[in-house]
Amino acid sequence: MKTKTLGTNKINIVTLGCSKNVVDSEVIFTQLKGNGYEVSHESKKDYSNIVIVNTCGFIDNAKQESIDTILRYADAKEAGVIDKLYVTGCLSHRYKDELELEIPTVDAFFGTNELPRLLKTLKADYKHELMGERLLTTPTHYAYLKIAEGCDRPCSFCAIPLMRGGHVSRTIDDLLVEAKSLAKRGTKELILIAQDLTYYGLDIYKKRNLSELLDRLSDVEGIEWIRLQYAYPAGFPMDILDVMNSKSNICKYLDMPLQSGSTNILKQMRRGITREKTEDLIKSIRDRVPEIALRTTLIAGHPGETEEDFEETLQFVENARFDRLGVFTYSHEDQTHSYTMPDNVPAETKQERADEIMAVQQEISLENNQKKIGQTHKVLFDRKEGGYFIGRTQFDSPEVDNEVLIPATQFVRLGDFANVKIENVEEFDLYGNLISQ
């Protein structure tokens, strides 16, 4: 029974999934605000009568979280708590027909490239003058800058091209406009994201052009850190390391998902690289930028992964000594090439292998962190929690990497940089004290 209808439409946007989805939600947010709507992001208050859920469809766990969230708001609509429910993003793009049948309470489903249609449904106009403008859902001092959409890579396990399409780079000029706009509003750290940063420019400049983009972005006044996430190893453009060395505001940090340390599994994954070439690449990167922090992601239990393949990956992790590492258990995604193979590694075995990799990495992380005791690092402070101010060094990305904690008795302003001497460490946290300026 309907119990609530508000005279003025108030919209709550709920974001699930990766940083690329965060950017998409921020664009929706900006466009709706530009049309005069009252908009919130993941509001905890029950006052919005319209909800937009921006879904993730990457792997099983993410899909389930998206479905659970849609169902929660569908129940709220049926109870009269909200009036309208719209769903967009990757899950909606990939499974629109099935979702419409299974959850008819949703007023409309939209794909990843259907922002104009979503706005039209809400009786809002797409405002071209807002291109490059973004209202942030992150703390204002850092922002994700999506430099390209989609992916042309043939990875056998990945459904991203099915949901996001082929690789499309944004122009350097457009990205500079957005970066300058963000800097004027207080952004100090730009986190460059794409499904594959290293492919940037091939479609519009006919060459890998990430190094020029970095060079131009580094000159934007007010930007003190530029961070690179999601670089593909095969065909890695080494010239970006030269720019990293020459520009003090480009973080000595690289997120390069490698997926496996087994040549056999890399071949089945269609990654275009072997373990040996991967190890040579890591050595070359560290030789060129000795301070660099390398983050990677691995997949445990891909179809056909034998115990021998897993042991090869485990040895690879022990040898590579990554600064940061995450592990996913393999998710059998329909319409991908890997889906044609038997999903023959039991779920329990996948999880055991993932846990074993992380146990090795935990020891490596602790040993790496212990070397930082007594060092002083420039830290950007993100939040206050409990009795601590919490921030990050240039070697750490938000939410996924190490954090630096100082007692809240030593006051710092959130969004500011400060020098911190590291006094104590754990596997994934550093504890320190402010150094007087």
Image (spheres, helix red, strand yellow):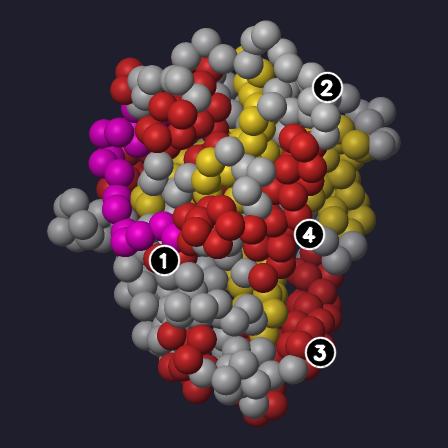
Q: Give the number of the disc on residue 287.
A: none
* Contact check, label 1 and label 2, Cβ < 8 Å: no
In primary-sequence order, the first of circles 4 and 2 is 2
Residue 3's mark?
A: 2
Q: Position of residue 235 (x, y in %)?
A: 28, 65
Tell which tag, 4 or 1, sits nearer the viewer.
Answer: 1
In the orientation shown, which residue stands out farthest toward the left? Answer: 206
Q: CA distance from mark 3 to mark 4?
A: 36 Å
Q: CA distance from mark 3 to mark 1?
A: 28 Å
Q: Which residue is mark 4?
A: 372
- Which residue carries the number 1 mark? 162
State which region is magenta: 163-182
**Residue at the (28%, 59%) spot, across then down:** 152
Mark before the other along the chain sequence, 3 or 1: 1
Q: Are marks 3 and 2 in contact (CB under 8 Å)?
A: no
Seen in the picture, residue 49 relative to 400 is either above or below; the reply is above
**Amino acid type of disc 2?**
Thr
Distance between mark 3 and mark 2 Cα atoms:
46 Å
Residue at the disc numbered 3 = 348
| Alpha-carbon span between mark 4 and mark 1 | 43 Å
Q: Is residue 201 above or below residue 278?
A: above
Q: Secondary structure at mark 1?
A: helix
Q: Quadrant of residue 432?
A: top right
Circle nearer the N terminus (1, 2): 2
| Type of amino acid at the residue the image marks with label 1 | Leu
